[in-house]
Image (spheres, grey):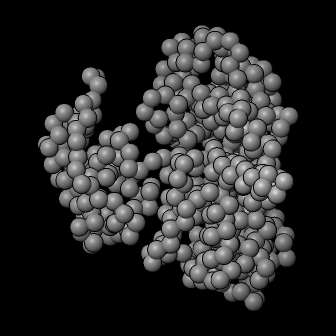
Amino acid sequence: MSNFANQLVVAEREELARCIRTLLARPLLTERSDPAAFDLVRRRRDPLIHWFDYHCGWTLVVEPRLGYARLLKVRADADATRPARRTRPGRAPFDRRRYVLLCVTAAELLSVPVTTIGLLADRVVRAAAADEALPAFDTAQRAERVAFVDVLRLLESYGALQTVDGTTDSFADSAEAKVLYRVDATVLMRLLAAPCGPSRLAVPAAAIPGRFEALLTGLVRERRYGPAATEAPDGSGTPGTPGIWEGPEDPEDPDGPDDPESGTPEAHASPVQRNLWLRHSVLRRLFDNPVLHRDDLTGAQLGYLTSPTGRQILRRAAEQAGFVLEERAEGFLLVDPDAIATDSKFPDDASHAKVAALLLLDTLTASPAGCTSEQLAAEAESLLGRFPRWGKAYRTEGGAAALASDAVQVLAEFGLVRGEGGRVVPRPAAARYRVTGATLKEEPPA
């Protein structure tokens, strides 16, 4: 009996670890998209909720009857490395126009359980026309219809929209296309992970450009870490400027509340709140990023992570989630041996940019002081010359510079390089990679 009980404990641990890594990669998981994974999350709901709340301060909502699980991952800083992407081949990131359409479309869908693509487009047209801050939406232009289709397909991939009849892509070719949708408002309302709703930070449209950074910061403020900078020390907001504190300075803190971008908790936080913030801020970054360098941390964060308590919590969290923790003099790395939590791989030959990124690493690691964009473009030009049948999309005027730029972006997203004084400088984690040989794989005909 004891052996059977031990087997059950091991199985539960393995299932919990798999669920944690699944939700890290897919914060919105629906029963329709992956029944097996959702059933596992449903059965391990309580320990999962506790794990994410304790270690990262993230809220996990599991709705078995409604068929979805939503991990509300919050960051204190804006991260552009994981944009919304179009579902068509190439998976290009959303541009400003598509993000605007996404917000307006989502707002219009909240009030209708069933709609057609034509009726929805008309609602978006009227909503854009009624708001002076929004550009007009013109369905007569194909580019506008294509952007709208990208938005709807993204919502379909999230499970917020379900196609009942017709195909969404048909609207790109004709504004008269007939497509019927069923709207899942519960999933739609869970898409926004911000702790503070945008409506609570509403300001006149003319004031948004000047206060954009403050408004963006206000969206991710979390009260559990102390009085927000958007509030007065007594907890009351400033009348007339929702979400923006412009009151008198605190006499005990003449410098005012700390800036979250500086990596410190709020100035008026208690010791318990500061300790909670340290644990969550460090583990959030480690479980959400490929690598965490020590020089990215503040003194307080590094002190917590290297303390006996911090190290114990870190190692236990990594073990419970099924990661292999690598601790180096330069930083920390979590490795998922099953690649469940991996949303993007490196090295990877899935794109020319990733291949070039790996090949350019040798050049970068050989120059600790970094390389200029011109040097990297020259190296990319050399790569195109060495492999004349590779990288056809970059064989245009300025193609080598574009290839180098795309490769650097890949490296930056994986925490392997950073920009310093106009140069691209390798980070310590870049030393993990070395190219021993390169073989050309024939590309399919265009």
227 or 3: which is nearer to us? 3
Residue 176, relative to residue 150: is it above or below? above
- Where residue 131 sits in the image (x, y, percent)? 67, 37
Left or right of residue 52, residue 361 in this image: left
343 or 249: which is nearer to us? 343
156 or 322: which is nearer to us? 322
- Where residue 268 sits in the image (x, y, percent)? 76, 80
Residue found at x 67% / y 33%: 34
Question: How many circles with numbers are drawn on the protein?
Answer: 0
Q: Is residue 51 visible?
A: yes
Residue found at x 43% / y 33%: 90
Left or right of residue 162, residue 444 in this image: left
For the N terminus, which image quadrant?
Answer: bottom right
Residue found at x 70% / y 35%: 36
Q: Where is residue 307, by image quadrant?
A: bottom right
Left or right of residue 248, residue 236 in this image: right
Residue 91, relative to residue 401: is it above or below? above
- Where residue 260 sits in the image (x, y, percent)? 63, 70
Q: Is residue 130 visible?
A: no
For the C terminus, which image quadrant?
Answer: top left
Residue found at x 76% / y 65%: 54
323 or 240: which is nearer to us? 323
- Where residue 74 sits in the image (x, y, percent)? 67, 57
